[in-house]
Image (tube, helix red, strand yellow):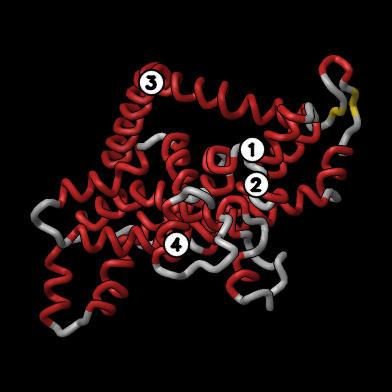
């Protein structure tokens, strides 16, 4: 027994000495990442919280405490932008995941030309948002766009052609023939932004899911196929559980990115606000107040509230969705 305790003491002493020797190397290796994260992540967040407690412009700013937060939470523009953001998140993340899962499953079973197809699907993601949005604006132009020209050739357009990115009325209102109020659901302009985002970002999800599918042993699916399991059962009981880490990662990243989306809104609508502010999400509201109205304190307060919403929703996903992830 004494010899065993002595051996353990020697082992722990060796590990302790080794860890002390490795500490400077570890600090040296992580220092660049910590510096970048601190300068471009933590410091701006602290500065945003600090500025949110002040009102005014430039050197004339004065301390008002939580006044900007009270103003934001009682502002119609804030809640409108929050609703637009929620519509955007709900309308893009689940749809992108579903489409990417189906496409990745199809590409996974393709043997010839798989690399070429991967490149084709990934090209939209690596294309500049501004360049892609410019093309989409031309396609959706109500006067000269290909979208209306195609619908007209098919005889699906009456006297009032769709205005697409210029349409403030709700898409449910348009589809129901006016039976559903116009303010219920996202506007047609916002739906156009959603479709663009799904097209532009699905390539990234497809590549991640393809990597996850490639890590699944083929023997499992072959055994299930021999046992008579159909397509649904194989995906439900084999593919989805083993692919859940990749799906969970894409869900977390997709929701955070959707809450922070700005480029597609600004590039497609020109100002980000769209017709009657129906595409003004929270990031556009922040940008408008900071750079157009010079309301630094109010914009910083909205940015802080947005950060809190993202953190809260991420923790909720970790709590309720993370437990369903299978890592083995």
Q: What element carries label 1?
A: loop
Q: How far separated are the C-alphas under marks 4 and 3?
A: 39 Å
Q: Name the residue under label 4.
A: 95
Q: Where is residue 210 in the image (x, y as percent from the top left)?
A: 25, 53
In the rendered view, would you say 321 is above or below 18? below
Q: In this view, does 310 lie to the left or right of 250?
A: right
CB within 8 Å, label 3 to label 1: no
Q: Name the residue under label 2.
A: 274
Q: What element carries label 2?
A: loop
* Viewer-closest of 258 and 165: 165
Q: Is mark 4 on a helix, strand or loop?
A: helix
The N terminus is located in which quarter? top left
Q: Where is residue 289 in the image (x, y as percent from the top left)?
A: 75, 34
Q: How far separated are the C-alphas under marks 3 and 1?
A: 42 Å
Question: Which label sits on residue 29?
Answer: 3
| Dot in front, 2 or 3 | 2
The residue positioned farthest toward the bottom in the image shown: 228
The C terminus is located in which quarter? bottom left
| Dot in front, 3 or 1 | 1
Q: How crowded is mark 3: few (under 14 residues within 10 Å), some or many (20 or more)?
A: few
Q: Is mark 3 on a helix, strand or loop?
A: helix
Q: Mark 1 points at which residue?
A: 271
Q: How far separated are the C-alphas under marks 2 and 1?
A: 7 Å
Q: How crowded is mark 4: few (under 14 residues within 10 Å), some or many (20 or more)?
A: some
Q: How far separated are the C-alphas under marks 4 and 1?
A: 26 Å
Q: Position of residue 112 (x, y in %)?
A: 8, 54
* Viewer-closest of 292 and 103: 292
| Dot in front, 4 or 2 | 2
Q: In the image, what residue occupies the spot 58% across and 66% down?
A: 159
Q: Is residue 303 left or right of residue 313?
A: right
Q: Where is residue 197 in the image (x, y as percent from the top left)?
A: 47, 49
Q: In this view, does 83 lie to the left or right of 210?
A: right
């Amino acid at each position: 027994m004494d010899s065993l305790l002595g051996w353990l003491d020697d082992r722990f002493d060796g590990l302790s000495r080794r860890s002390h020797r490795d500490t400077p190397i570890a600090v040296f290796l992580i220092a660049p990442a910590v510096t970048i994260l601190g300068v471009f992540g933590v410091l701006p967040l602290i500065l945003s919280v600090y500025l949110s407690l002040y009102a005014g412009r430039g050197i004339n700013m004065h301390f008002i405490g939580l006044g900007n937060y009270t103003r934001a939470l009682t502002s119609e523009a804030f809640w409108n932008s929050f609703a637009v953001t929620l519509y955007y998140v709900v309308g893009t993340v689940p749809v992108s995941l579903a489409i990417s899962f189906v496409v990745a499953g199809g590409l996974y079973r393709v043997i010839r030309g798989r690399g070429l197809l991967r490149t084709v699907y990934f090209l939209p993601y690596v294309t500049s948002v501004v360049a892609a949005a410019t093309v989409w604006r031309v396609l959706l132009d109500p006067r000269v766009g290909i979208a209306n020209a195609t619908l007209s050739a098919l005889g699906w357009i009456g006297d009032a052609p769709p205005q697409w990115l210029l349409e403030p009325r709700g898409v449910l209102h348009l589809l129901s023939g006016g039976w559903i109020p116009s303010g219920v659901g996202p506007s047609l302009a916002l739906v156009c932004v959603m479709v663009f985002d799904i097209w532009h970002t699905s390539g990234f999800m497809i590549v991640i899911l393809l990597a996850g599918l490639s890590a699944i042993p083929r023997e499992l699916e072959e055994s299930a196929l021999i046992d008579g399991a159909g397509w649904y059962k194989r995906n439900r009981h084999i593919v989805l559980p083993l692919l859940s880490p990749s799906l969970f990662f894409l869900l977390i990243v997709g929701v955070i990115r959707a809450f922070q989306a700005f480029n597609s809104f600004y590039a497609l609508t020109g100002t980000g606000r769209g017709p009657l502010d129906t595409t003004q999400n929270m990031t556009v509201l922040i940008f408008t107040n900071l750079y157009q109205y010079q309301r630094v304190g109010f914009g910083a307060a909205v940015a802080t509230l947005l950060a809190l919403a993202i953190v809260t929703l991420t923790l909720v996903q970790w709590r309720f969705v993370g437990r369903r992830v299978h890592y083995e």
